[in-house]
Image (tube, rainbow, N blue to C red):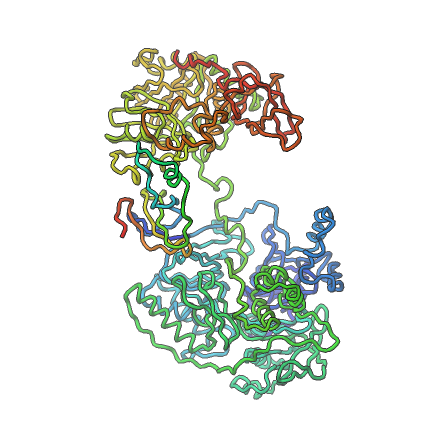
Amino acid sequence: MSQKFRLENVGLINRDKKLSFKFNGKTYYGYEGDTLASALIANGVHLVGRSFKYHRPRGFFGAGVDEPYAIVQLYRNNETEPNIKATEQELFEGLEAKSVNCWPSVNFDIGAINNFLKIFLPAGFYYKTFMWPKSFWYRVYEPFIRKAAGLGVASTKHDKERYEHKYEYCDLLIAGSGPSGLASAYAAAKNGARVILAEDKPRFGGSLLTSDVNIGNQSGEDWANGIISELKEMPNVVVKNRSQVFGYYDHNMLVMSEKVSDHLPKTKKYHPKQRLWYIRAKEVLISSGSIERPLVFGNNDTPGVMLSSAAKEYLKVYGVLVGKNPLVFTNNDSGYETAIEFKKNGINPIILDSRVNPQSEIIDEAINLGIKIKFSYVVVAAQGYKKVSSADIAKISNDKKQLGTIENIKCDCICVSGFWTPTIHLASQSGNKTKFKEEIDAFVPGTSKQNETTLGAANGIFTLEETLKSSFTAGQDLSKKITNKDNKISFPNVVEKISSQHDKFWCVPLPKGKNYKRFLDFQNDVAVSDIEIALKEGYRSIEHVKRYTTLGMATDQGKTSNLNGLQLVSDIENKVVPAVGHTTFRPPYTPISIGAIVGREVGKHSKPTRKSPMHSWHEKNNAVFVDAGVWLRPRYYKQGNENLFEASKREAKNVRTNVGVCDVTTLGKIDIKGPDAAELLNRVYTNAWLKLPVGKARYGVMLREDGIVMDDGTTTRISENHYHMTTTTAQAANVLSHLEYYLQLVWPELNVNVVSTTEQWAGAAIAGPKSRKLLEKLFPNNDVSNEGLPFMGYTESELFGVKARIFRISFSGELAYEVNVESDNGQFMWEKIIELGQEFQVQPYGTEALSTLRIEMGHVAGSELDGRTISYDTSLEGLISKKKDFIGKRSLNREAFTLSDRQKIVGVVPLDKKTSIPEGSHLVKDAQAPLPNKKLGHISASCWSVEHDNPFSLAILKDGKNMIGEKLFVMSPLKNKVIPVEIVSSHYVDPKGERVRS
Amino acid sequence: MLHIKCPYCGMRSQNEFSYGGDASVKRPELNKEISDEEWDNFVYNRKSLRGKHLELWQHLFGCRQWIKVERDTATHEIFNTYKADEEIT
């Protein structure tokens, strides 16, 4: 297919490189440097989609980030991505794209019936219609709407692309590389400032690429290229294209999305697809330019109606004509620039100017070129369904209220210009309270909130000379403050044509007897009549009007519709625009892919993985791992075809009968040193610590100030002023912060230092009746008898030449020891234990067996110390010292904590001794009681007791102390189970604790 | 993301810190008889100020020091930061 709308010698595309691509299954050709939009227009394709609500045909409206229509589904390298703007997507060889929001095809779209039913689809339609009957919502309405609506389909496949995050600091961040961005960047760079210059398009230069100006005796484009080449050579400057600064956050933190590979057929090896930059800038220069405003008239959404600046950009940058018989409809001089470009390329445009008798250099030039101009004329309505074929035009009275006789003229596109809207999003996001500038009928930034300065068109300055002057000065002054350098730059000579005043007119009245749709928001199909209805129905606040009509709520976030919407509300309400105010600008400025936001923190990189030094041994021995916080711990060691239940039962049983070994490296360990260490422990734990002798361990419970149990663990006195604290795996980091808080802020007079040693020590728990015999083999030179190393004793030794710490502590309730060696020797220790333990039938056991052992012993863990329980609830009240004060003690007097029927830990056994009890189930008195059935308690942990060979659970039960022997029901609506149970003591095995002392 | 000046390490990003609440709260002395009301005020009752607020932050992924930060809760402006034992002027 030939590119019928491509010009021969105009444009910045690379005609030496022809690219083929597919749109809706059909093959076309374009050139390197095209966007998908420019390549389609070159091929005469103007129908690219259907609108959201009425499914009206949609073409192209803009040429960049402001595009409301041309949203496509993109296919690239066997991946698909929705919500891609054809005006931003650069063409690459093999690109494939499809229309969205139409079914079965863009040419024949069943949903377009909505267009003929539009009388039934006014503002708030969904709120009003789909209310009843209620059951219809998810059965009928929602599935229908979901099928009919939508802007593409998200891929359900895993995204194999790489996205990166980068953190950067700079003196000046400059957003936008138009004239103001280039001038300020250049001045600041010459002063030695560290500059980042970001441009969202592939080409630098902004408006200089399309405007007919002269700077320092060069064309605007040549001047821009010269500045960019010079900036790129400077070591203090980072110049980035395809990079959109989309968010302005607190303390001058800005976020920028760099599309590294989206313009290539395939991402290069080791390259990311996109990169998100977090930039902390000392000063921010917002040179984001402005977006042309549409004029509002009948059927102004017909394909072929587009912004005049976009038509000019397609022509000058891509060498593409948006039509060969163009009509330009304008209220200012910008439309003339577009018409002049058409004329220069052999096309005869007609200009309709709503103004009565404007005069300026540009208008004179148009007249001299012989362009036909009709003053006081407007487009009343576009005609044509899938493409503009003609326009109804009419003379308009000076008060803009009366239309003359309607004439119809042939045209194939209508280029509209309703003046310019500064892009103030970033300034507004920074907290800048914007102000309305009467001369341009638009909002501009007010007083800076953070260190931000808005320049050029974004600040409502539309002449090049003033833009360049103020931008050079801003770049120079701001950088001088930072670098203390003052390199003067000579200001270039600027030649530009001065524009005349624009017309405040923006909306063409409806002719008598016609009911044309006049659209404000092109993506969400919000028309003038919708806003009128919303106001009639009593909506006043612009925020409410926005939500009720969905004006400005589409993926383009109202870039082309916001101001016209405000104009309309203020016209109807007889207010001025600043009194109506504008809706809030929030980041992101333009849609950002989820991949870019997530970055590399996906899958196993979503959090760090911590492995014990014995990890490779566990792997080799068929360990099945489980996530324990950020640690990977063996859950069980699989033998043959065993499942979790069988393996954990075997492992636990072996601990009760022989000896088992468990990797306990993950326990938090804190080294505590200093003359006041004992005093600190005495204040942190509920029990007494001042008299703990050297070489002894003690179990302790610590509370939060509100009396709730925070953590438990054993702490051992290694020497006079040296203690070794252990915490639970989950609370390790919190406990360290807790100790630091009290030492640094509350009791700085205590002479103590704390440091985490979790990763310095590898730990193995050796538990079971034969553990002492194994210990004798491991440490033949030590006296590990019950007298030599009694329960809660501690000694230091050597394990075949390796320094080791031996603690006689037990979590399993059996005779048990915990051996610590330096992490590097962990694997050696583990292998020695396994090797020497063979004769005692040693087996490794995982967290599942560990849980079984502690549950049937009634030892509490995280599931009981769940941030809601106090010492009494977990039967740890015996460890509360009456003699001394400690953290949280004063809270224990609270009324709720002293009630006689307060919850307490109990054991739970099913009456049939067979049915396992789901964790989290509720305990109730009467299983048949009407709902809501009163909950008496909940199951905190469940296991299969290896000692009694039946299920056993722990529960936190109201008045648990007096409930032993009671029969209750366990209910689990989730698992649909009701189990009759008996309440027993939480100490289901060895209630007197004889084994640990044996 | 806030930019906080650690008095020991200099300007650092918020994600190196953890928030620790109102810095003006003083823990009652140990072993001192105090009323329920005083204790409740210490444990629970906090003013949710709009404006200047002296608060605690810990430089968790840095020097691990608890510091005091004077911040505007509405605008996020940080006026000053102090070491834990520094006189606040």
Q: Is A957 in front, or is A425?
A: A957
Indicate the quadrant containing the N terminus of chain A: top left, top right, bottom left or bottom right: bottom right
Indicate the quadrant containing the C terminus of chain A: top left, top right, bottom left or bottom right: top left
Query: Which sits in the foreground, A477 or A617?
Result: A477
Is residue A392 something one can see in this rendering? yes
Residue A923, quarter of picture: top right
Q: Is residue A89 above or below residue A164?
A: below
- Residue A921, position as x, y percentages in the image: 58, 28
Residue B14 pos. (x, y %):
39, 49
Q: How many numbered discs, if any? A: 0
Q: Is residue A232 above or below residue A988?
A: below
Residue A826 % position (x, y): 37, 26
- Quarter location, residue A953: top right
Q: Is residue A32 left or right of residue A378?
A: left
Q: Position of residue A527 (x, y in %)?
A: 66, 67
Q: Residue at x 33, y 63 (%)?
A: A193
A685 relative to A277, above or below: above
- Asked whether residue A637 appears in the rendered view, the answer is no
Q: Nearer the viewer, residue B58 or B89?
A: B89
The answer to whether A155 is drawn above or below residue A782 in the figure is below
